[in-house]
């Protein structure tokens, strides 16, 4: 049974780092292009949430109907911990949803895709969600640093429906070290010898896999492009007219485990055979997708990658945790391992409230509201809060201790279902005003002792007039 | 309701400020000594039957949030009953209310109410700004103290056209009053331009819209009215009090143009005193930020809703205005040592009602002074006390 593709989504981080900034910092001239970098409240989990939310929306699939989440990333936010469960819960998947977390190398993205496709074709899942996301943290001063990026792609797979089918698959293993992290290391090491990698490892293996797919009538190729050049070399060898992954590399740099699928999304907007090759950690896998009509979500991939705020190298180092203040930072008041998070996990990650059966008012979060905030009524029924709303009032906080970064806008928001929340707003507050429309998105609220804590933030929405 | 009348026969405080050279215990002793010394006919410390200590975060060693209930030991009253009152920013106000109830009930005849707070034994980062990381990991993340009031300023400006100049007028007035108050932390005139040009702390509030971090202590002596003559011929009486609660988290608030708990507490206090806001001659209100005083004077009924900013700019609440507010300099100039704040405000009311406020003295034609604090995360509690010199 062929696995079908129902919808896709993409996400890019908030920051863009010009390569010239990095070159200048290390006393080198030049530096072409840029890289996408996570803001302090973003990571592979939040990028994956963004992309998955868009893919589910494009596919018209209710998250509760997804049978499993297959997630590939080299950087699970918990080195050992509930990464998969947190993402699945925040996406609103059923607690019975299965799937797997693939990590260990940039090849994890292809592993997640193959795992999901196999589960669907085997009948183990009717609907599967694939998330590939990464936010690499390069060694400082390495040549790879300037183009080390971040990004995410998501695909909704199903046993039926959709407008594309998965086809051929090729895989090869060959044990070698390219870019890697040793046990306990936090930063990815660059290649030991670029020429050795290119001539003896990358080109032979990748062209072998791509070449096996070239026997089909491939219209578009997404080929591995770890440095912005090798992809074009492979394309030439297999006779491809171009490499769709190159445009992603140009926009946000090397996106690790997300690269192969993120590079292919734009090609899914037109009929024809799309070939995707991903590599890393000594493994290379290629697949084909036969697109019948444009895949929902593929047309707006470019929009997702196009936005971004140009920042300085210092901003990036601080956001990546590579520039830290001396002394102790103020710890979060509630330890993330404590009972409050056991009680509050679902209401935080799924934005739950309680609607009063007497007066209809929504109180949130439920764990601190045994009665209605308006009438005191004792009967509250659980509801998911609306994800869009309007700023009722706001502040921009300029005075906070480390690890906070000012300015920090905080807004009281009237959600479209009548509930009221107070949340941080993404950005510096310049676009926040009373009456401003916002949408709620998952972000990393804090990160300490190596533990991330996730919750929702408001993102301002531009009106059509403002966009024009 | 039947209760015994309560008199204030002594009140005093120490000079407020960054008192790095004084311990929590030394501040408490200083305030107690000042209150004892203020009693016209003399007062023996051994006459204190019970103490109520207002402390929001204090302790005998630092700011760990416990302690305070053994303050009598530190000030030479070892062994007497003592209760610590922690009711957020109104801790001092509420200790006065609870102390008054202890006398009104007939359980005690002579009660000490003392407020003490060490705000500066810890760095600003640890002592105050660490709030940004406390509380709920999402819903209160980044919520330093100004975040609890600045949203009201944003909304008040939006709905009523209140301007930053009007906010600044509160700070200018209170700093002027502070110049006249020898106990004030800051004794320096400022201008509206100074406030507008001060660095942003939490938009739309700037540095001079905010009260300082101040160490301090204050004490009052409450006795049953029938024994007041033993201590003074110029007693001041507790005319009424009111307390009210409201939602602590800002997203639960119905309105960002009023402090609901203050409105409710004021109504209770006025009802108990049998007067209305038009009979108040002077008021010490909670001006932790400039916007707070604007909300206060509206919610206490001194001006119509939305008129607080304009009335302040027009001088209605100045020393020579229609209803002088925060004659002591308020929290903005005198300081806000949390547990001590309300007790210090009562001291100012006591002086005004006895005609002893010096250059700050205002005309007490009706004989009523009002004292008010609000706090508790997003003003989850508010306390109003009304004093009178009428028998």
Image: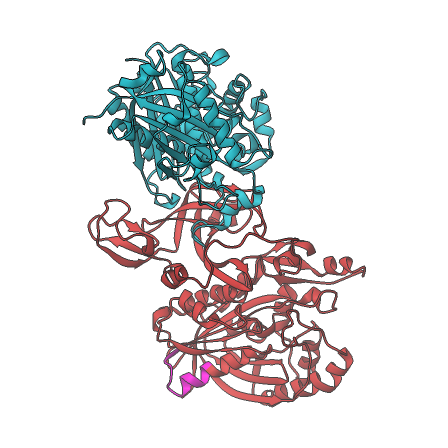
Chain colours: A red, B cyan
Q: In this figure, what is the number of numbered marks?
A: 0
Which residue is pictured at 58% across the width and 76% down the height?
Answer: A260
User: Is A127 in the magenta?
Assistant: yes
**Residue nearest the viewer, comparing A29 with B371:** B371
Image spot of residue A456 (x, y percent)? 44, 56
User: Is A51 in the magenta?
Assistant: no
Q: Is residue A66 left or right of residue A398?
A: left
Could you say which quadrant of the image residue A178 lies in? bottom right
Image spot of residue B350 (x, y percent)? 40, 18
Which residue is pictured at 42% across the width and 51% down the height?
Answer: B139
In the rendered image, the vertical position of residue B380 relative to residue A166, given as above or below: above
Q: Is residue A180 left or right of residue A364?
A: right
**Residue nearest the viewer, comparing A55 with B134:** B134
Q: Which residues are magenta?
A: A116-128
Image spot of residue A112 (x, y percent)? 50, 79
Quadrant of image for the N terminus of chain A: bottom left
Q: Is residue A350 left or right of residue A240?
A: left
Which residue is pictured at 42% across the width and 16% down the height?
Answer: B351
**Residue nearest the viewer, comparing A216 with B267:** B267
């Amino acid at each position: 049974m062929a696995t079908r593709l129902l919808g896709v989504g993409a996400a890019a981080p908030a920051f863009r780092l010009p390569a010239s900034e990095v070159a200048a910092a290390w006393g080198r001239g030049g530096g072409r292009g840029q890289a996408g970098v996570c803001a302090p409240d973003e990571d592979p989990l939040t990028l994956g949430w963004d992309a998955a939310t868009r893919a589910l929306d494009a596919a018209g699939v209710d998250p509760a109907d997804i049978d499993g989440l297959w997630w590939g990333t080299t950087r699970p936010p918990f080195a050992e911990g509930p990464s998969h469960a947190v993402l699945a819960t925040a996406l609103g998947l059923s607690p019975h949803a299965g799937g797997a977390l693939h990590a260990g190398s940039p090849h994890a993205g292809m592993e997640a895709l193959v795992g999901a496709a196999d589960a669907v074709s085997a009948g183990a899942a009717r609907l599967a969600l694939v998330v590939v996301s990464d936010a690499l943290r390069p060694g400082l001063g390495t040549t790879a640093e300037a183009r080390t990026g971040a990004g995410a792609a998501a695909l909704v797979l199903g046993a039926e429906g959709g407008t594309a089918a998965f086809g051929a698959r090729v895989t090869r293993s060959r044990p070698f070290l390219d870019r890697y992290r040793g046990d306990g290391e936090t930063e990815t090491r660059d290649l030991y010898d670029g020429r050795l990698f290119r001539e003896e490892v990358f080109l032979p293996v990748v062209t072998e896999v791509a070449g096996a797919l070239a026997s089909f009538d491939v219209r578009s190729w997404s080929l591995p492009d770890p440095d912005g050049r090798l992809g074009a070399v492979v394309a030439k060898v297999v006779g491809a007219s171009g490499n769709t992954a190159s445009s992603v590399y140009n926009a946000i740099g090397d996106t690790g485990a997300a690269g192969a699928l993120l590079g292919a999304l734009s090609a899914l907007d037109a009929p024809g055979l799309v070939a995707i090759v991903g590599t890393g950690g000594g493994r290379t896998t290629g697949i084909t997708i036969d697109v019948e009509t444009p895949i929902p979500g593929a047309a707006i991939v470019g929009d997702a990658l196009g936005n971004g705020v140009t920042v300085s190298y210092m901003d990036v180092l601080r956001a990546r945790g590579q520039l830290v203040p001396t002394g102790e930072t103020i710890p979060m008041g509630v330890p993330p391992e404590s009972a409050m998070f056991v009680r509050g996990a679902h209401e935080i990650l799924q934005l739950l409230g309680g609607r009063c059966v007497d007066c209809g008012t929504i109180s949130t979060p439920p764990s601190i509201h045994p009665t209605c905030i308006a009438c005191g009524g004792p009967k509250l029924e659980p509801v998911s809060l609306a994800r869009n709303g309007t700023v009722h009032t706001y502040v921009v906080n300029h005075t906070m201790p480390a690890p906070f970064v000012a300015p920090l806008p905080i807004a009281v928001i009237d959600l479209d279902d009548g509930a009221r929340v107070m949340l941080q707003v993404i950005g510096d507050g310049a676009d926040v005003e009373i009456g401003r429309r916002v949408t709620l998105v998952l972000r990393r609220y804090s990160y300490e002792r190596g533990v991330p804590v996730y919750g929702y933030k408001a993102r301002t929405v531009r009106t059509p007039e403002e966009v024009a | 309701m039947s209760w015994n009348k309560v008199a204030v026969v002594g009140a005093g405080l120490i000079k407020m400020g960054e008192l790095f050279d004084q311990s929590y215990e030394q501040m408490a002793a200083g305030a107690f000594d000042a209150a004892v010394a203020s009693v016209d006919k003399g007062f023996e410390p051994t006459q204190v039957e019970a103490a109520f200590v207002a402390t929001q975060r204090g302790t005998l060693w630092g700011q760990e949030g416990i302690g305070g209930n053994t303050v009598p030991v530190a000030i030479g009253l070892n062994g007497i009953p003592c209760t610590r009152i922690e009711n957020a920013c109104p801790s001092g106000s509420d200790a006065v209310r609870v102390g008054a109830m202890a006398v009104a009930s007939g359980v005690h005849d002579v009660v000490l109410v003392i407020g003490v707070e060490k705000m500066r034994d810890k760095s600003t980062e640890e002592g105050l700004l660490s709030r940004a990381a406390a509380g709920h990991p999402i819903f209160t993340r980044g919520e330093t103290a100004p975040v609890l009031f600045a949203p009201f300023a944003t909304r008040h400006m939006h709905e009523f056209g209140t301007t930053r100049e009007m906010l600044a007028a509160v700070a200018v007035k209170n700093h002027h009053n502070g110049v006249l108050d020898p106990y004030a932390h800051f004794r320096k005139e400022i201008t509206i331009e100074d406030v507008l040009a001060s660095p942003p702390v939490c938009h739309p509030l700037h540095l001079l819209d905010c009260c300082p971090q101040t160490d301090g202590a204050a004490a009052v002596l409450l006795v049953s009215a029938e024994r007041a003559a033993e201590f003074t011929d110029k007693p001041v009486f507790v005319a009424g009090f009111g307390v009210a609660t409201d939602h602590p988290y800002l997203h639960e608030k119905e309105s960002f143009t009023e402090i609901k708990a203050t409105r409710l507490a004021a109504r209770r206090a006025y009802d108990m005193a049998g007067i209305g806001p038009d009979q108040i001659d002077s008021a010490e209100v909670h001006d932790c930020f400039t916007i707070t005083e604007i909300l206060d004077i509206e919610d206490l009924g001194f001006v119509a809703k939305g008129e607080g900013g304009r009335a302040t700019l027009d001088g209605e609440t100045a020393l020579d205005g229609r209803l002088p507010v925060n004659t002591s300099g308020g929290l903005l100039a005198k300081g806000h040592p949390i547990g001590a704040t309300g007790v210090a405000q009562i001291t100012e009311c006591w002086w005004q009602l006895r005609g002893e406020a010096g250059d700050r003295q205002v005309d007490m034609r009706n004989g009523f002074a009002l004292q008010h604090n609000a706090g508790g995360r997003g003003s989850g509690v508010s306390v109003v006390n009304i004093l009178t010199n009428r028998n």
